[in-house]
Image: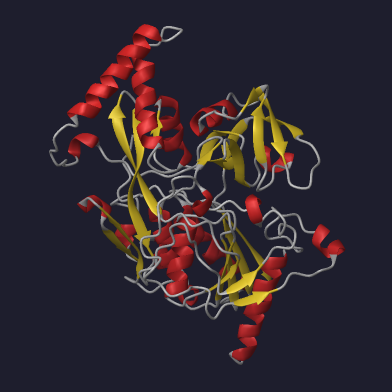
Amino acid sequence: MRLLEKAGLVGLGLVAGVMVSLHFSAVAEKDTVATPLPIEELRAFSEVFGRIKSDYVEPVTDKKLITDAIAGMLNGLDPHSTYLDADAFKELQVGTHGEFGGLGIEVGMEEGVIKVISPIEDTPAYHAGIKTGDLIIKLDDTLIKGMALNDAVKRMRGKPGSKIILTIIRKDEPRPIEITLVRAIIKVQSVKSKLLESGYGFVRITQFQEQTSENLASALTALVKQNQGPLKGLVLDLRNDPGGLLTAAVGVSSAFLAKDALVVYTDGRTDDAKMRLTAAPENYLHGRTESDYLQALPDSIKSVPLVVLVNAGSASASEIVAGALQDHKRAVIMGVQTFGKGSVQTVLPLGNNTAIKLTTARYYTPGGRSIQAKGIVPDIVVEDPASAGRDSGIFRLREADLNKHLINDKQSEEKPQSANKTTLSAPDNKEDTAKVAPSEFGSKNDYQLNQALNLLKGIQILQGK
């Protein structure tokens, strides 16, 4: 197992087939402050343990009781701290390479049911029509109510080719829907790109993996070559990107920022949790012998007019990139308010192939903003007309909606972020709205993308080019 240096876990929730990122740290190597053991509380724990062993209606193994106790301690902290058994730990490591087994759904738990945050493109869930905001109430014949999120995710995983039936409640549907999915090995292409028209490029990042920033560099170079010269404008699409590796977020930001510009800083109780990550190779390269692929980028990429698209499914690493580019005034952020996950998780191996995923720090944008339970507010608010209904009310899930979420420790210090924002209204024509598929980002009917392209063309006019 290769340890990833400074690779913070900034992914969102859990995926049916894990796709979150890693920050490994060996427990034995961390300095701990000696504190007296809480004798009374440990005595109570021992008594409960003994009562269950002797009086519970059925025999229970010591391993199950202790494992469940560990899981309970972590689940009681915040929505992102959790216990990883051997299977979950293995899939977590595999997920950072962009390949894992499952359905391809980013999910969270809310009020005892699973809420779909976003389907991952080109996966069984995507092709079956699973939508953001869907509430999963049953897996095959088993009700979700009362089930832990980890247990529900385990049930959704399985052997590729096997089937599972999801029973879903969807807004505007009079009764639950049953959808049969076939599990598959999920291979996520994290960077997709194309030339929208002469002079204008489009790059979409679906999640932040180990190779994302290197793949971005290749995509940008190819776009400039295909355009036969510098681009007039570029759209960076981070919609429904739930996050991933912190190092990848730093690398993506570094592609557009000046060398050594501050990208993000973190703050926590331990020295390891306090970092300042700048646009420097040591903060985004995963190996000491790895060449700096960003050096080969065309010089024009540092100054090309840039619009970043975000929505309620943009989280963690996506918000780090959007926040850095917004604070440095390097890009115009367009879309709707992001998810608001401003914490970093560290994976601490426990031995016997298990681990805990523990929230160890909050992260902050270069300007000192915390997006925890708040998110990034776009410079220009543009609703997606095809998802306006699902992106409102109870169907717009954000960090602030999660039970036991961390508070925003800088909320009272910050000026209202909504000042000087512009809102573009979506068209009222229902026929036009119906043509847009919510998950078909980058299509010719993508309303938000078309608005971004119009803005870039307007910038060119204002610059006299």
Q: In which quarter of the view is residue 184 placed? A: top right
Is residue 185 visible to us here?
Answer: yes
Q: In which quarter of the view is residue 444 placed? A: bottom right
- Colour scheme of the picture: secondary structure
Establish if 461 lies above or below 213: below
Where residue 35 appears, as percent x and y from the top left, is 14, 38
Q: Is residue 64 left or right of residue 465?
A: left
- Work out whether residue 447 or residue 74 is closer to the camera in this orientation and state it: 74
Total numbered labels: 0
Q: Is residue 191 left or right of residue 3?
A: right
Where residue 433 appears, as percent x and y from the top left, is 80, 62
Task: Look at the image and tell me in which quarter the C terminus lies.
Answer: bottom right
At 71% from the left and 60% from the top, the residue drawn is 388
- Work out whether residue 236 or residue 168 is closer to the camera in this orientation and state it: 168
Where residue 30 appears, as percent x and y from the top left, is 19, 41
At 64% from the left and 78% from the top, the residue drawn is 455
Is residue 255 visible to us here?
Answer: no
Q: Is residue 71 left or right of residue 129?
A: left
At 44% from the left and 30% from the top, the residue drawn is 88
Task: Look at the image and tell me in which quarter the N terminus lies.
Answer: top left
Q: Is residue 451 left or right of residue 407?
A: right
In the image, farthest residue toward the right: 431
Where residue 194 appears, as percent x and y from the top left, is 64, 62
- Work out whether residue 449 or residue 188 is closer to the camera in this orientation and state it: 449
Establish if 423 lies above or below 171: below
- Work out whether residue 195 or residue 279 is closer to the camera in this orientation and state it: 279
At 49% from the left and 61% from the top, the residue drawn is 375
Q: In which quarter of the view is residue 196 placed? A: bottom right
